[in-house]
Each structure stands twice: as structure tokens, then as C-alpha cells.
Amino acid sequence: MSTLYYIHDPMCSWCYAFKPVYQALLKQLPDSVSNVSLLGGLAPDTDQPMPLEMQQQLKATWQRIEQQVPGIRFNYDFWEQAEQTRPRRATYPACRAVIAARQINPGKETAMIEAIQNAYYQQARNPSDPDTLTALALETGLKADEFSRHLNAAETQHILDQEITHSRQLNVSTYPSLVLQTRDQAASVSIDYNSHRNILDTINSILNFE
């Protein structure tokens, strides 16, 4: 049995752009390949406001994605209303929220990821803020007090640390990334934001070589 590792961050805009292709890919993975998602942890905790230069860089990234990936659109109110959204370069809280949802109910993990992405990219809400994450948990059907306990638990940070370490052991430093672990090797799989078939061809080529 081989494993396809998907390394991502819920506040990674390229991960958001990759979602449609990734979902199509999962539907056509060979039966011999299992799928495991790992949180890469794009940016650690901080209370410091995001510098204006970085805000402009991320806004430019969103614009570049819209040019390169048809169908992907962003709500730029997040940057235009920075006094209200209070951008910070901190994605660990959102990563912990995904783990918290998984710990409470594994079936809620994907829903939490999608809620974070929709909040950030479409609704101009800041998933770096615990209050936003708790509100999103409620919207996905979780109980606020139970979610908050898991979100702030040392065990949740420990799991995130383990997943970050695992992703680094797979030689991953950019997100999203795909790595196919076979019996003999861990092979990086190139990301194609517009075609799951090209990715599937690469996976099958690696498997056939084995």
C-alpha cells in the first residue's frame, strides 16, 4: 500500500486555489494508494500586526492566482478593510482549529478547513483570531466550549508540531505539496492547478516504476 501525503495550510491561498483539482484527484486515486493530509504550519503564532509590505505581497499573490487558476476569485475587502480585519502573519491558530475539529469529530475536519477558507478569502474575516475560529466551529455544528478546550489544549499544539515535523521529513517547505510514499521511496509529485489528470499520470508513473 502506498500513501499520498497532502501537505497544506488552511490559510495558504495556493492551497485554496488547488482545492478543486485536489478533490477531483482524490476521486480517481488508485485503490492501492491511501491519502493522508498533514498541516505544514505556514506561519507561527504572533500578536504583531502584519507589515503593510507583506499585506501588499499577499494581495499580489491573490491577484496572481486569479490570473493563473480560472474560477478562483478572492474578496479583497480583507486587505482594503485592514483596520477591521487586523491582518497578522499567523496561521498556527487556524491549523490548531482544524486539528481541534478532527479531534472532536473526524468528519468535521474538511468542513472546518472550508469554513476557514471561506471566511478568509470570501467573507473578509480573520482566521488568525480565536473568536473567529470559535464562530466558524459553531457554523460547522461544533459546540463552542468543547471546541475552545481542544483549540487551546497542549495536545493540539503537540499534534501540529508532529505534523510539521513529518512534513519536513518529507522535504516539504512549500504549500500545497504532494508526496507519494511507496515501499522504496518518497517521491515529490508536481502540482498542477488546472488538471488533476496530469497529477494522476505522475502518480501512476511512479507506481508503475515500482
Image: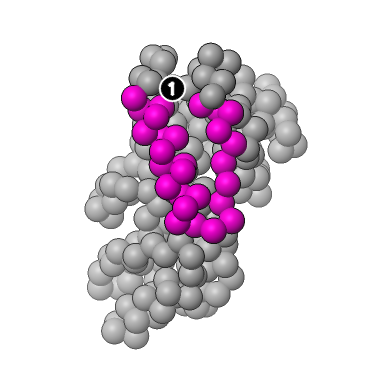
**Residue that appears at 39% across and 29% down:** 56
Residue drawn at point x = 30 percent, y = 73 percent: 183
Q: Return the x and y of residue 109 as percentages of the image width and height.
A: 60, 45
Can you tell which quarter of the image residue 51 is in? top left
Q: Amino acid at mark 1?
A: Arg
- Toward the bottom, the furthest residue is 208
Residue name at image x 51 percent, y 26 percent: 79
| 183 to the left or right of 98 | left
Q: Which residue is mark 1?
A: 88
Q: Quadrant of residue 119?
A: top right
Residue 202 or 166: which is nearer the viewer? 202
Q: Looking at the image, which is closer to me, 179 or 72?
A: 72
Does 19 sit left or right of 53 as displayed?
A: right
The residue range painted magenta reads: 53-79
* Vertical relation: 10 (above or below) 23: above
Q: Is there any visible trace of residue 153 in the rendered image?
A: no
Q: Is residue 56 left or right of residue 78?
A: left
Which quadrant would the N terminus be assigned to in this image? Answer: bottom left
Magenta portion: prevailing SS class: helix
Examine the structure image and report whether residue 78 is included in the region drawn in magenta.
yes
- Say which quadrant the C terminus sits in: bottom left
Residue 189 in which image quadrant: bottom left
Residue 77 seen by the camera: yes
In this picture, is 59 found above or below 8? Answer: above
Residue shown at 49% from the left, 57% from the top: 69
As helix, strand or loop, the secondary structure at mark 1 comes to loop
Q: Is residue 25 above or below residue 109?
A: below
Q: Position of residue 87 (x, y in %)?
A: 47, 22
**Residue 62 part of the magenta-drawn span:** yes
